[in-house]
């Protein structure tokens, strides 16, 4: 995977995960089970994006 594609994937995961986490916090008032699902899922997706950010930082510049 090229560095440009990895950069795009990282930011989609980070921002998408944080958006889902925030949505889950709002949904908690109406439905606790669904809200916690969004919170946990969004947090996990954002954490994967953060882990890939560390991987990207350790990679050298591409050709």
Image (tube, helix red, strand yellow):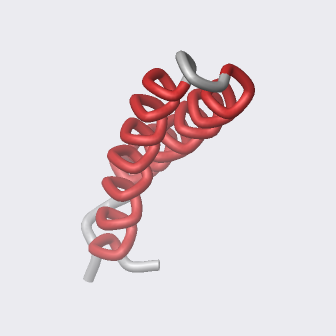
What residue appears at the point 47 percent right and 31 percent down from the top-left corner?
21
Quadrant position of residue 36: top right
Quadrant position of residue 2: bottom left
Quadrant position of residue 61: bottom left
Q: Is residue 5 above or below residue 38?
A: below
Residue at the bottom extreme of this rendering: 63
15 vs 28, nearest the viewer: 28
Q: Position of residue 15 (x, y in %)?
A: 33, 46
Q: Position of residue 13 (x, y in %)?
A: 43, 52
Q: Is residue 7 above or below residue 4?
A: above
4 vs 62, nearest the viewer: 4
- Direction from residue 8 to residue 26 in the image, left or right: right
What residue appears at the point 31 percent right and 66 percent down from the top-left corner?
8
Q: Is residue 42 above or below residue 31?
A: below
- Direction from residue 56 to residue 51 in the image, left or right: right
Residue at the top extreme of this rendering: 29
Residue at the front extreme of this rendering: 30
Q: Is residue 5 above or below residue 39?
A: below
Q: Position of residue 22 (x, y in %)?
A: 40, 29
Q: Position of residue 44 (x, y in %)?
A: 60, 36
Quadrant in which the C terminus appears? bottom left
Q: How many labels sit on residues?
A: 0
21 vs 44, nearest the viewer: 21
What residue appears at the point 40 percent right and 64 percent down from the top-left corner?
9
62 vs 4, nearest the viewer: 4
- Direction from residue 9 to residue 24 in the image, left or right: right
């Amino acid at each position: 995977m090229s560095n440009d594609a990895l950069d795009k994937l990282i930011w989609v995961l980070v921002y998408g995960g944080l958006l889902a986490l925030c949505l889950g916090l709002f949904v908690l008032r109406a439905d606790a089970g669904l809200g916690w699902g969004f919170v946990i899922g969004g947090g996990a997706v954002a954490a994967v994006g953060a882990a890939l950010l560390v991987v990207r930082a350790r990679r050298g510049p591409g050709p």
